[in-house]
Amino acid sequence: MALRKKKYFVLDTNVILHDSSCIHQFEEHDVIIPIVVLEELDQFKKGHDSLNFHAREFLRILDSLSDDKIFNGGVRIGPGKGMISIKLDQPPHQDLTPHFQTMNPDHKILNTAYHLFKNKSAQTVILVTKDVNLRLKAKALGLMAQDYRNDCVEDVTSLYTGARTVEFVPEELIKRLYKDPFAMDPSELEWEHAPIPNEYFVLRNGKMSALTRYDFSTNSLRKIEKDISYGVTPRNAEQIFALNALLDDNLKLVTLTGKAGTGKTLLALAAALERRRNYHQILLARPVVPLSNKDLGFLPGDVNSKLEPYMQPLYDNLGVLRFNKNKDNTSQINKFLEEEKLVITPLAYIRGRSLVKMYFIVDEAQNLTPHEIKTIITRAGEGAKVVMTGDIFQIDHPYLDSSSNGLSYLIEKMQGQPLYAHVNLTRGERSELADLASNLL
């Protein structure tokens, strides 16, 4: 059996800040850390964000492996793993000097990889970075470059949608769903893919149809009704499915995806207010993007004033519920806010909390990394319900995309779990103009 050709992976700082355990993902191949990466990690050590956690954790991992050989040949990462070594800065390679006037950290990392590439002509050298621009520069020099995709979704176009339409269902089966016990055995239908727990179905035969959810505990398709929550009426089948999941206290984790205007945040907030008596508090949060404190510093006022523009979309959705026909809504919601039964906060403010008996909504979850998603969900205490909403095709994070963001990762990993439900909303309901712009522009 032929031995696999050894590869050398040169890591950029952003890979480590994305996943501090990344060095364990390269099997028997060697990992190279340019010294400038350690200098950059040093700037991220202090703080409470996930970037700071990853910087500290990686440096601890490196310290546990370190000895004098880490700068001279490297040390073994673990049994069956390759070596890890730190490379000191080298003079700019002559092939790079005509193209780069300054040696900033990115160019120093590229220079380290390129020197290795020239010295290791018999082996494969790969620069691993989540920076698209740096990957393009590397490829222009003939150096292989890859994104770090250990926690990425393989094919985002085939990502679980949470709902399917089944055509040509026998008429007698649909009629049966409208009679007690309002359920049917799924084995009575032919399936291309078997139903999974809490998957939603539109069963249709011409003009006759029924909306159902697969109940794993009873192995049945159960008819679901059109619920109205806090004055909000769902306008299409997908919204009916979403509201059904949001109102079910047995479903501890719900994700909603879809383009702008499909009603993700509004439905989640309406369901939370409808179910408020079952929870101690409703917590509505979203990540602050951009995450840099420098960006916040340009805004006037104290920290609350600085954060207000990032939280405004949540207040806008709350405003819709305040004035939604029912005149009591305004006074009720104002009372909830005053008594902190309803709290709107930046996501960073919940770090370290244990969320017991809370209805916790995370908006714009596509801007979170897989590690941040895990950190949030592991905060859920007894009786908590976590709802995550977002558009996986509208990413504001500089190093995430539709396949590497935490929301896509969560959907792929959680599908089929009895405590979880997902619905992808495709039909815009904000306005005819908004829907047209979303589709065409």
Image (spheres, rainbow, N blue to C red):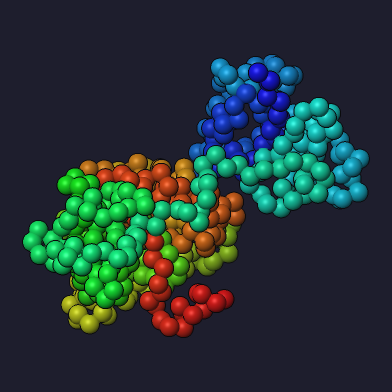
| Quarter of the view holding residue 112 | top right
Residue 381 x/y as whole percent: 26, 43
The residue located at (9%, 58%) in the rendering is: 181
Q: Which residue sits furthest left?
A: 180
Tell me if I can see residue 44 in this picture.
no
Image-based side of 176 in relation to 290, left or right: left
The residue located at (45%, 70%) in the rendering is: 260
Residue 50 x/y as whole percent: 49, 44
Of residues 383 and 402, which is closer to you in this image?
402
The residue located at (32%, 62%) in the rendering is: 166
Q: Quadrant of the N terminus?
A: top right
Tell me if I can see residue 257 in this picture.
yes
Total marks placed: 0
The answer to whether residue 433 is above or below residue 166 is below
Residue 99 x/y as whole percent: 87, 50
Of residues 247 and 1, which is closer to you in this image?
1
Image-based side of 260 in relation to 66, left or right: left
Residue 329 x/y as whole percent: 21, 75
| Quarter of the view holding residue 228 | bottom left
Q: Quadrant of the C terminus?
A: bottom right
The answer to whether residue 173 is above or below residue 58 is below
Image-based side of 387 in relation to 391, left or right: left
The residue located at (67%, 36%) in the rendering is: 11
